[in-house]
Image (cartoon, rainbow, N blue to C red):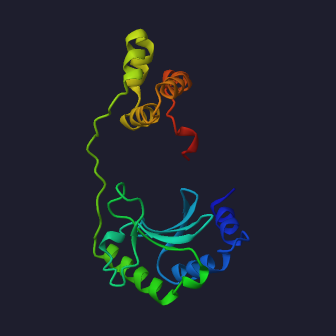
Amino acid sequence: MTKHQKLTAFFETDTPFKEPLNRLRSVLLETELEEDWKWNFPTYTYGGKNLIALGRFKEHFGIWFFQGVFLKDRLGLLRNAQEGKTKAMRALNYARKEALDIDIVKAYVDEAIANSSAGKEVKPDRSPKKVAIPDELVHAFAKSDILENAFKKLTPGKQREYCEHIGGAKQETTRLRRLEKCRPMMIKGIGLNDKYKN
C-alpha cells in the first residue's frame, strides 16, 4: 500500500473514534505541517522533523507531541507518552470522543509549531548504552564461538534487543527457550525486530 492508501484506510476505518480523528486531521492539515505515515500512524512533520502523530487504540485515541515537554500545558492535560522511557514526548488521550475540545488542541498544536520553529528540541541520547548480557547467553557463548562472534558483529541496538528479550523473562526455562529461538537469527545477523522495521 502507498502512503496515501495507508492514510486513507486509517481515517476511513469505521471505529468509534473515526469522527474525532478526522477532526484532528483537519486541524493539522490547516497548518503548515506535512502529513506522513510512520510507525503505522499518521505523523505530521515541520521542517522535516517529526512534530505530531495521531493514534487510535481499542479504548482511546490521542494526539502525540514529539517535543511536548516544551508545551506549557497550563490545563494539565498532557501525560508522558511512556513514563520512564520518553523524555520529550507528551500526549493528549481521550477515551470518549465528546471529551475532544478542538480549540484546546489547536492551541497546543500552534505552540508545538512555534517551539519547533524556535529550535526547541530534546536531542536523543546517542551515547552507547552498556548491554547487560544475560547469564544464559554468556554460558551459550562459552560453548559456541560461532554464536559469540555472530553476536559481537550485531549492532549495539540489535544486541540490546536480544539481551532484553532473553533476560526479560522471569523463569530460567523461558529464558533458555527464548535463547534457542533467537540463536539462528543471531548467527544469520538478523535483528530480533527486523521484520517490523520498514
Q: Name the image quarter holding the N terminus.
A: bottom right
Judge whether 91 appears above or below 82 on screen: below
Residue 91, x across and y down, in percent = 44, 70
Q: Nearer the viewer, residue 32 or 22?
A: 22
Q: Residue furthest front?
A: 171
Indicate the position of residue 70 as horizontal and vertical percent values: 30, 73
Q: Is residue 33 left or right of residue 59?
A: left
In front of the other: 182 or 115? 182
Residue at figure coordinates x 42%, y 16% from the top left: 140
Q: Residue at x 37, y 84 (%)?
A: 75
Task: Give the side of residue 22 with respect to residue 133, left or right.
Answer: right
Q: Is residue 189 left or right of residue 114?
A: right
Q: Quadrant of residue 98?
A: bottom right
The mark total stands at 0
Q: Please provide percent x and percent y for residue 111.
A: 36, 81
Q: Quadrant of residue 160?
A: top left
Q: Residue 168 appears at what percent x and percent y?
A: 43, 36
